[in-house]
Image (cartoon, rainbow, N blue to C red):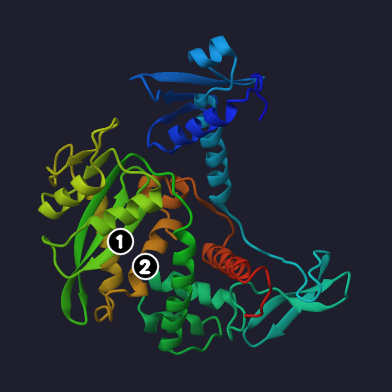
Amino acid sequence: MPNQYTPNPSIDQREMRGQSIAQNFGWVRRVDETTYMVHSQTLDREYRVEQTETGWVCECPDAQFRFMKCKHVWAVEISWTLRKRVEEARRIEPIETQACVACGSEHLKRSGVRHNISGDIQRFQCLDCRRTFVVNIGFEKMKHNPKAITTSLQLYFSGESVRHTRESLKLMGVQVCPQTVLNWITKYVGLMEKYADQIAPKVSDTWRADELYVKVKGDMKYLYAMMDDETRYWIAQEVADTKYVHDARLLFQKAKEVAGKRPLTLITDGAHNYERAFNREFYTNHNPVSVHVRDIRLRGQVHNNKMERMNGEVRDREKVMRGLKRMDTPILRGAQIFHNFIKPHEGLQGRTPAEAAGIKVEGEDKWKTLIQNASKSATDFRQRSRGGQTTED
């Protein structure tokens, strides 16, 4: 990005200080697309940094009198670049084609459709090596077509039982047993969960935390959940053995890691374990100071209705089951993915919490889009870990 400042031998020190400012939570505050307020490292004040036709302009003395690219401009450029990268990562699009499996060429053309008892899959031909192949990202070596798998995920997490899901698949000509549906849930929820955790949602500064009892092998356990108040994005969860004495710090740590920040306001009930976790994970003497609101009521200005509505979704999923089998069950993690990325909410004007948090999942079948991108992300990671060598799944 161009700027109006002249080079200087001490520019590296200013860049390092700018990086230090950008890493401090709340020190680079975005006012609008062209204006930022940056906290001073030495004074209790903020400097305005604005974007002009020639670049970023800061009102600090270093920029005004020495005509240097100051540390505040460096901090804004670092923050601006990071925000653009995050916005690009928040757009998740379907993957229709890829390079040729034989020669790696991207010069492809459609070459009819492969028909079998599992469904239809588009065929492609490489214009360089002339090889014909199919692209089935995320569903490689699966007996049934992607539509059957994503339909089963949609039905199950909408509240249908495994057996009712199987009966609905019969209408599509898909014959499966209940265990197959559970195997699909286990496989693809685990894949999507790892991918979704890499995407930072753009949540507000007010979060809510609550617990809900669930049965695991007939024993009472508690599902702890953290949700953003504005977007209703389900940020983090964990299952615990106890209610009032459980250390909620792990939940708070994961929420802070996923969101990339701490909340300025946390709303919970009066349980003391929330207070202890808040003091250790979110509270700080530096501005802005986080506040813990513990006085919630069914009626009044501060209530927990939004959190109770999300708890109702979990309860709807649980009531057609005979309890959960284990504490790290994929059922609860799948419910979180369904809540965030798939289900539209009336309170969000028909948007999903992910869309309200700036994450756009494209395509008619959002389950398929998530699975494709999650599979591609996992494959790319394996290739990087193995020095770029391509291996067949």
Question: Quick one: label 1, few (<14), some, or many (20+) residues within 10 Å?
Answer: many
- Residue found at the far front of this picture: 9
Q: Which residue is mark 1?
A: 237
Q: Residue at x 59, y 70 (%)?
A: 382
Under circle 2, the secondary element is helix
Inspect the image, locate mark 1, and give the three-letter code of the amino acid beneath it. Gln
Q: Position of residue 359 (x, y in %)?
A: 50, 50
Q: Is residue 390 visible?
A: yes
Inspect the image, locate mark 2, and give the three-letter code of the amino acid beneath it. Arg
Q: Residue at x 57, y 74 (%)?
A: 147
Q: Which residue is mark 2?
A: 333
Q: Position of residue 253 (x, y in %)?
A: 30, 54
Q: Position of residue 98 (x, y in %)?
A: 72, 66
Q: Position of residue 350 (x, y in %)?
A: 43, 49
Under circle 1, the secondary element is strand
Q: Is residue 352 visible?
A: no
Q: Which quadrant holds residue 183?
A: bottom left
Q: Residue at x 51, y 82 (%)?
A: 171
Q: Is residue 230 above or below residue 189?
A: above
Front position in the image: 329 or 377: 377
Q: Is residue 338 above or below residue 142?
A: above
Question: Decide: marks 1, 2 in contact (CB < 8 A)?
Answer: yes
Measured Cα–Cα span from mark 1 to mark 2: 8 Å
Q: In the picture provided, is 340 more to the left or to the right than 385?
A: left
